[in-house]
Amino acid sequence: MLRSSLARSVRATPLRNAVGVRSVHAVSTPSLIDLDKRWESMAREEQKDLMDQLAERQKGPWTELTLAEKKAAYYIAFGPYGPRAPLHPPKFHLKVFMGVLGGLAASITLFLGIRSFAAGPPHTMTKEWQEATNEYLKEQKSDPITGISSEGYKGPGHVQSK
């Protein structure tokens, strides 16, 4: 039992003391300048090469990365392109707002135009006509239990106009 634990510690020692040395060169700065403006127009192979170079560079200490490399790595990982592209182009909301206002103005214009050609209210909507209807229904004893002809009725009857 002591021998097996000693053998394991001897085998594990070289791995803990091993130091990885990478000789990765920095990605050229001109290829990283304005990457966010050029990314979508770049060829797939060029995008892949740049991603591979940055991935290899990120395996080393991040303190050795240049600011341009850090920005490029962030853009490639989280930038607004592909599936993360904005759904609507700039000023889309203004166009929608103006379209809604235009539709509202058109509907109001159409409503007022149709209403200007409409006939006036029917003669049965005058207050006098409705009061005469109430009197007629009382004479006819219409709805004697709960309606206008019932005892103690205090409702307006058929009068709707003012």
Image (cartoon, rainbow, N blue to C red):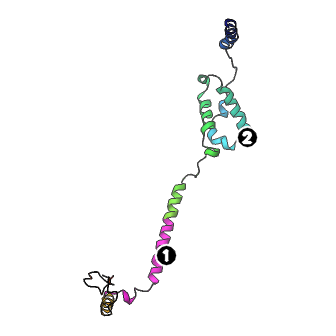
Query: From the viewer's perspective, is residue 81 above or below residue 52?
Result: below
| Type of secondary structure dominating the magenta stretch | helix
Mark 1: amino acid: Leu
Q: Nearer the viewer, residue 19 or 161?
A: 161
Residue pictured at 62% horizontal, 33% vertical: 73
Would you say residue 116 sits in the magenta stretch?
yes
Residue pictured at 67% horizontal, 30% vertical: 55
In percent of width and height, residue 43 lies at 73, 41
Q: Which residues are magenta?
A: 101-127
Residue that label 2 marks? 44
Q: Nearer the viewer, residue 14 or 11?
A: 11
SS for callout 2: helix
In percent of width and height, residue 72 lies at 62, 34
Query: From the viewer's perspective, is residue 38 above or below residue 67?
Result: below
Q: Tell me: 89 left or right of 109.
A: right
Residue pictured at 44% horizontal, 86% vertical: 119
Quadrant in the picture for the C terminus: bottom left
Residue 27: quarter of image: top right
Residue that label 1 marks? 110
Mark 2: amino acid: Arg
Query: If you read the primary sequence from the N terminus, does the residue marked by circle 1 or circle 2 appear first?
Result: 2
Residue pictured at 73% horizontal, 37% vertical: 46
Would you say residue 136 sits in the magenta stretch?
no
In percent of width and height, residue 112 lies at 45, 77
